[in-house]
């Protein structure tokens, strides 16, 4: 038995210069310690120096780049949700038809279905940071255009 508690295996380094009969070779049995070992007690989060509970959830926010990305995504997703809700409300207000709400929802998904494979190729070839900036800026500009058209009463049934 070695000092770290692992089973030590014997290795045979033999340089055979002449033919040896297999019955002449003997292999030593490895030592096995069957004594009970101390089992470490499980802790909820490992080391005592690690934060516990809800504080562990927000550990990643200590990194400035991740915090910036997280807040940007939060603003973007809230804006997208507001835009989707406003579009649905606008369509229903203009048409008073639930069928048109379905059409708008379907039309919103068509570009994803049609451009998904091409988008993957573009995502592989364009630097991620530039791609994120371009797509987020494009979504923001389109949302502002739709808002301006609505406020100027250009959008009509």
Image: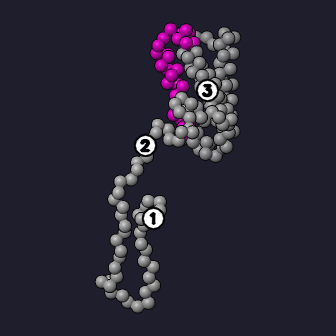
Q: Position of residue 144 (x, y in %)?
A: 68, 20
Which of the two discs, 3 and 1, sits closer to the camera?
1
Q: Residue at x 53, y 39 (%)?
A: 48
Separation of residues labelled 3 and 1 (CA atoms): 54 Å
**SS for tag 2?**
loop
In which quadrant of the rendered image does the C terminus lie? Answer: top right
Determine whether label 2 and label 3 are within 8 Å by CB: no
Region in magenta: 89-117
Image location (x, y in percent) of residue 76: 63, 26
Residue sitting at 41 percent across and 72 percent down? 10
43 or 97, nearer to the observer: 43
Q: Position of residue 6 (x, y in %)?
A: 43, 61
Give the labeled residue for mark 3.
74
In the image, taking residue 2 as reference, residue 138 lies left or right, namely right
Q: Is residue 111 above or below residue 36?
A: above
Which mark, residue 41? Answer: 2
Q: Residues within 10 Å of mark 3 (few under 14, many from 20)?
A: few
| Among numbered discs 2 and 3, the one appearing first in the sequence | 2
Residue 69 appears in the figure: no
Q: CA distance from mark 1 to mark 2?
A: 24 Å
In the picture, which quadrant includes the N terminus?
bottom left
Q: Residue at x 40, y 50 (%)?
A: 38
Q: Secondary structure at mark 1?
A: loop
Q: How many marks?
A: 3
Percent position of residue 50, x then y: 56, 38
On the image, numbered disc 1 is attached to which residue? Answer: 2
- Mark 3 or mark 1: which comes first in sequence? 1
Image vertical order of residue 89 relative to residue 11, above or below: above
The mark found on residue 13 in the picture is none
Between 28 and 141, the one lying in front of the other is 28
């Amino acid at each position: 038995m070695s000092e770290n508690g692992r089973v030590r295996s014997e290795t045979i380094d033999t340089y055979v210069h002449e033919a040896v009969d297999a019955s002449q070779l003997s292999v030593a049995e490895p030592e096995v310690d069957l004594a009970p070992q101390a089992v470490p007690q499980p802790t909820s989060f490992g080391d005592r120096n690690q934060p516990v509970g809800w504080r562990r959830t927000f550990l990643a926010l200590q990194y400035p780049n991740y915090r910036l990305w997280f807040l940007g995504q939060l603003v973007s997703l809230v804006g997208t949700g507001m835009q989707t809700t406003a579009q649905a409300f606008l369509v229903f207000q203009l048409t008073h038809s639930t069928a048109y709400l379905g059409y708008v929802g379907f039309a919103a998904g068509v570009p994803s279905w049609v451009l998904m494979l091409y988008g993957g190729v573009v995502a592989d070839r364009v630097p991620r940071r530039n791609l994120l900036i371009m797509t987020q800026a494009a979504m923001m500009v389109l949302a502002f255009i739709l808002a301006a058209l609505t406020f100027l009463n250009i959008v009509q049934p």
